[in-house]
Image: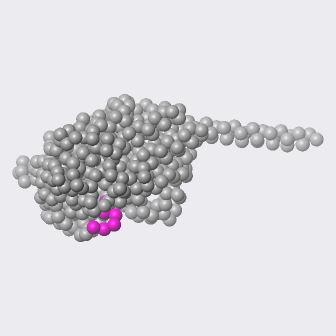
Amino acid sequence: MKNNKISLGLLVACILADNVAAETDAKQSSAKPNILFIFSDDQCFETIGAHGLTEIDTPNLDKLVNNGASFSKAYNMGAWGGAVCVASRSCMNTGAFVWRAQDAVKEVGKGKRKSWSQLLSDQGYETYMTGKWHVGGMNTKKVFDHQGTVRAGMPKQKSAGYNRPKDEADYEKGWKPWDKKQGGFWQGGKHWSEVLADESIGFIKSAAKKEKPFFMYLAFNAPHDPRQAPKEYIDRYPLDRIKLPKSYMTQYPDQNAKGVPIIRDEKLMPFPRTEYAVKVNRQEYYAIITHMDAQIGRILDALEASGKADNTWIIFTSDHGLSVGHHGLVGKQNMYEDGLCAPFIVVGPGVKAGQKLDTPIYIQDAMATTLDIAGDVPKSIEYKSVLPLLNGTAKKSYDSIYGAYMGTQRMILKDDWKIIAYPQLKKVKLFNIAKDPHEMTDLSNNPEYAAKLQELTQALEDTMDQMDDPMESLTKANAPEAPKKKKKGDH
């Protein structure tokens, strides 16, 4: 009888210990902050009203800027193909630098490597995504716990949406961004940005009932073309409100198969570029961003109503920038600041409100930052958390910033100096972006800066080696060439 009592006592003790352990695990899990990642598509760093760089209305993104920290120099590393977003998103979801990201995606697909969401899942997060994916070889159903509507690379763009507007008469009779018959973002009857907000709000409401922390990956297709928005948003931007970019020109001099390629993006606007065409395209660009901003506001309101806001980190960025008239260019297949740089905003517990940093980072640092917030950044992640920059324990994350586009362009930014190399054209451009932020004065032929040009060229060559760049050297442009004709995915 005595032995039975001892056994019963041990059993009760074990049950109590298990209950305590389970309760402790639950408390530790619930103590972890939630993570809300908002990702736009094709959004240049200048298109946030609070930054004061363009005349644009983004009241909800402005709130994030004012309540958190924003970076003015957040770069995409580049691309191996015309669809720059594919490379950017592959880097973002694997943590691998650009020339290693394709293999990293394949490893995730084969179960030999874990994706961003899977790494957070391992740390106790319930994961969710909705919107644009465009990472071939990585199935969202396998790497996220839940998903909403998963979108393709871009909404369908009709032929009427290209080469426009030639003039005011052409505009009057042509394609209109609010015309639902044109499909695109209107396919399905409701604007895709609104669908994404609806689905995100639904998940937040369900997550509010749970203790488990969540990671939300909300990927808008906006403001990618076709740049469609309800007419009231277009009407907010009469053309006399739209200013031309300071770097506006009618034709980029190095736009060809060996320089900046003339692929799909560049054909949206007529050649040569006109002030009128640039203003109309920027009008529609601003309008779809403002419409997206309104949907972000709805999501943030839902987060606040859920009671989870105080324990949630929010990171907003885009997959790269976009030219829309800068330097005579339209797309992002270039190495100028407008094509490479995106907004990057961080809001969270302890982040100093209104903090502005001009330290260069990569947009994919968002991934490393969330893993740092969750508690562990695996050694396989090549990007850096921005938390040390935010709390003042580090002044920079990288000695230089590297950029590449296929076999036609290379870039390095080091301190205030930047070179853009066109290896197939045997041409290098040198800019001081502190004194010349619009990159309008090429100093490469100025003897005064010959040493600086040589220094940066060597730094770029060295970095190419470190990055496993397929181009042997700047003098041997043996990497893949730019596409010679439109291909599916060149967006």
Q: Position of residue 261 (x, y in %)?
A: 21, 63
Q: Position of residue 453 (x, y in %)?
A: 14, 53
Pick whichever, 460 or 268, lies toward us.
268
Outermost residue toward the right?
A: 1
Residue 478: within the magenta?
A: no
Name the residue rendered at 23%, 47% in the picture.
Answer: 282
88 lies above or below 293: below
Task: Indicate the quadrant containing the N terminus: top left, top right, bottom left or bottom right.
Answer: top right
Dividing the picture into quadrants, the one containing residue 486 is: bottom left
Name the residue rendered at 40%, 49% in the picture.
Answer: 191
Which segment is the magenta one?
486-491
Pick whichever, 278 or 455, lies toward us.
278
Count all numbered tags in the image, as a single digit.
0
**Residue 400 appears in view:** no
298 lies above or below 184: above
For the stretch drawn in magenta, the main secondary structure is: loop
Name the residue rendered at 45%, 39% in the picture.
Answer: 299
Pick whichever, 255 or 480, lies toward us.
255
Dividing the picture into quadrants, the one containing residue 405 is: bottom left
Q: Position of residue 425 (x, y in %)?
A: 14, 64
Horizontal arrangement in the rendering, residue 271 relative to residue 95 (left or right):
left
